[in-house]
Image: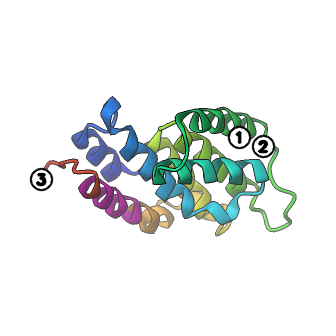
């Protein structure tokens, strides 16, 4: 768990309904870092809808459809056929997409971080220091997006 990110999200009031655009933008930013791990074309398409929605070129109905599809894809993902052991990375990246679309930004960030670290190798996820770089990026990205969305953070 990224404790600093959780604190910042709490301070920003990220759960507030009016901050859905920030939640979606942050979820998208996190997922884009692990987009290359997605194996299901449907998950990639759902991510495209999120990207378009954040850019203002997809409708609420398209977002709702992508939310439903991404949740179904994530829940039926059976892992990877890859021999390099990235099955968990692909599954986690897919769950990151589903959570980002659902507006659960912190869950999306958690799955994306897990996917990024797991892609190094299964051994890495048991080492908390393996997450430090990804967690630091998430905190910096969240602060940048808060500034872009005019959301104040406590000092």
Question: Residue at left 48%, top 62%?
Answer: 131
Real-space Cα separation, disc 2 to disc 3, in angstroms: 41 Å
Across and down, in percent, residue 111 comes to 56, 49
Question: Residue at left 47%, top 59%?
Answer: 128
What secondary structure do most residues of the magenta stretch adopt?
Answer: helix
Question: Residue at left 47%, top 38%?
Answer: 104
Looking at the rendering, the stretch of residues picked out in magenta corresponds to 136-147
Q: Give left or right: position of 138 versus 126.
A: left
Q: Could you classify mark 1 by the number of other residues whose Cα lies within 10 Å: few (under 14), some (14-19), or many (20 or more)?
A: many
Real-space Cα separation, disc 1 to disc 2, in angstroms: 5 Å
Q: Is label 1 in contact with label 2 (beta carbons under 8 Å)? A: yes
Q: Residue furthest left?
A: 155
Q: Which residue is mark 2?
A: 77
Q: Is label 1 in contact with label 3 (beta carbons under 8 Å)? A: no
The numbered mark, 1 or 3, whose residue comes first in the sequence reads 1
Q: Nearer the viewer, residue 154 or 84?
A: 154
Residue 126 visible somewhere in the drawing: no
Q: Nearer the viewer, residue 38 or 42?
A: 42
The label number, if any, that marks residue 74 in the structure image: 1
Across and down, in percent, residue 19 comes to 33, 38
- Which quadrant of the view contains residue 39? bottom right
Q: Nearer the viewer, residue 103 or 3?
A: 103
Q: Is residue 126 magenta?
A: no
Across and down, in percent, residue 127 comes to 53, 61
Q: Could you classify mark 3 by the number of other residues whose Cα lies within 10 Å: few (under 14), some (14-19), or many (20 or more)?
A: few
Q: Which residue is mark 3?
A: 155
SS at badge 1: helix
Real-space Cα separation, disc 1 to disc 3, in angstroms: 37 Å
SS at badge 2: loop
């Amino acid at each position: 768990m990224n404790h600093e990110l959780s604190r910042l999200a709490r301070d920003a009031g990220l759960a507030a309904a009016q901050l859905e655009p920030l939640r979606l933008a942050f979820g998208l930013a996190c997922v884009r870092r692990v987009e290359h791990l997605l194996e299901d074309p449907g998950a990639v398409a759902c991510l495209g809808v999120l990207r378009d929605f954040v850019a203002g070129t997809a409708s609420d109905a398209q977002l709702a459809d992508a939310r439903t599809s991404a949740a179904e894809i994530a829940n039926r993902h059976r892992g990877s056929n890859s021999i390099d052991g990235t099955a968990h990375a692909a599954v986690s990246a897919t769950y990151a997409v589903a959570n980002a679309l659902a507006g659960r930004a912190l869950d999306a960030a958690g799955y994306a971080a897990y996917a990024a670290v797991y892609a190094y190798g299964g051994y890495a996820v048991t080492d908390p220091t393996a997450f430090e770089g990804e967690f630091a990026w998430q905190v910096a990205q969240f602060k940048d997006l808060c500034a872009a969305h005019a959301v104040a953070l406590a000092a």
